[in-house]
Image (tube, rainbow, N blue to C red):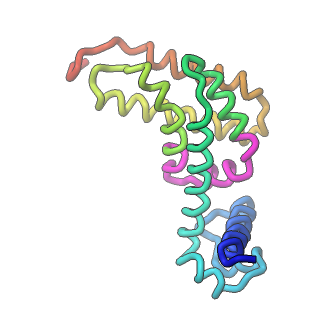
């Protein structure tokens, strides 16, 4: 086995161990010792690859972001945003272990915001809520957090709604949110 494949396999073992531990214990309570025991590797090996648990978690998050970005970049349904959302929800379902683990341990909301911002960028370009980009930023933050919460609820409820139905609901909520504001001129105040 080449060093590169060995390194990838070792990192995969550590990532898998952390994901499994995070399903039963909050991230901030997981020790390097527990990760090593779960991965059946020693601490020295851990420190050859990672500085600490946070760097390992960041590696998992970055991998999920990359997979999500790759999915989004290869899936295009111009004019059919609910179809894109439905395909994305299928992708989330296929990667549910990673999404559940990351989303339910995403205490500051950063991961969900990055993932869903990338997904919804094309949609937002079509729905400028205000002529004021600062106000748009707040409205979009509201919609991103809403979408993240809906998807977390869907994950928590073991996909009790079809991807297509949930995508149509999300699309409708975002669309109606954007349409509910009167268009204001740039810099306009309410």
Find residue 146 and report its horizontal and vertical position in percent: 54, 32
Quick check: can you spot residue 35?
no
* Residue at image location 38% in from the left, 20% down from the top: 128
| Image quarter in which the N terminus is found | bottom right
Q: Is residue 99 magenta?
A: yes
| Image quarter in which the C terminus is found | top left
**Camera-side residue of 46 and 140:** 46
* Residue at image location 63% in from the left, 80% down from the top: 46
The magenta region covers: 92-113
Q: Please determine whether, in this image, residue 170 is positioned above or below residue 67.
A: above
**Camera-side residue of 149 and 128:** 128
**Camera-side residue of 90 and 176:** 90
Q: Please determine whether, in this image, residue 65 is positioned above or below residue 181.
A: below
* Residue at image location 29% in from the left, 31% down from the top: 134
Q: Quadrant of residue 27?
A: bottom right
Q: Quadrant of residue 69?
A: top right
Q: Residue furthest front?
A: 2
């Amino acid at each position: 086995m080449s060093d590169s494949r060995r390194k990838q396999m070792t990192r995969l073992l550590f990532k898998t161990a952390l994901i499994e531990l995070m399903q039963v214990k909050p991230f901030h309570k997981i020790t390097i010792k527990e990760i090593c025991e779960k991965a059946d590797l020693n601490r020295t090996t851990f420190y050859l690859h990672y500085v600490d648990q946070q760097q390992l978690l960041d590696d998992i998050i970055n991998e999920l972001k990359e997979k999500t970005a790759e999915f989004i970049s290869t899936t295009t349904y111009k004019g059919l945003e609910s179809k894109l959302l439905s395909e994305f929800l299928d992708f989330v379902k296929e990667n549910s272990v990673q999404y559940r683990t990351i989303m339910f341990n995403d205490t500051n909301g950063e991961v969900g915001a990055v993932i869903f911002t990338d997904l919804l960028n094309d949609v937002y370009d079509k729905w400028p809520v205000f002529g004021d980009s600062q106000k748009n930023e707040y409205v979009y933050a509201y919609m991103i957090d809403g979408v993240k919460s809906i998807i977390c609820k869907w994950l928590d409820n073991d996909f009790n709604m079809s991807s297509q139905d949930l995508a149509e609901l999300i699309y409708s909520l975002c669309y109606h949110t954007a349409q509910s504001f009167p268009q204001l001129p740039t810099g306009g105040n309410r």
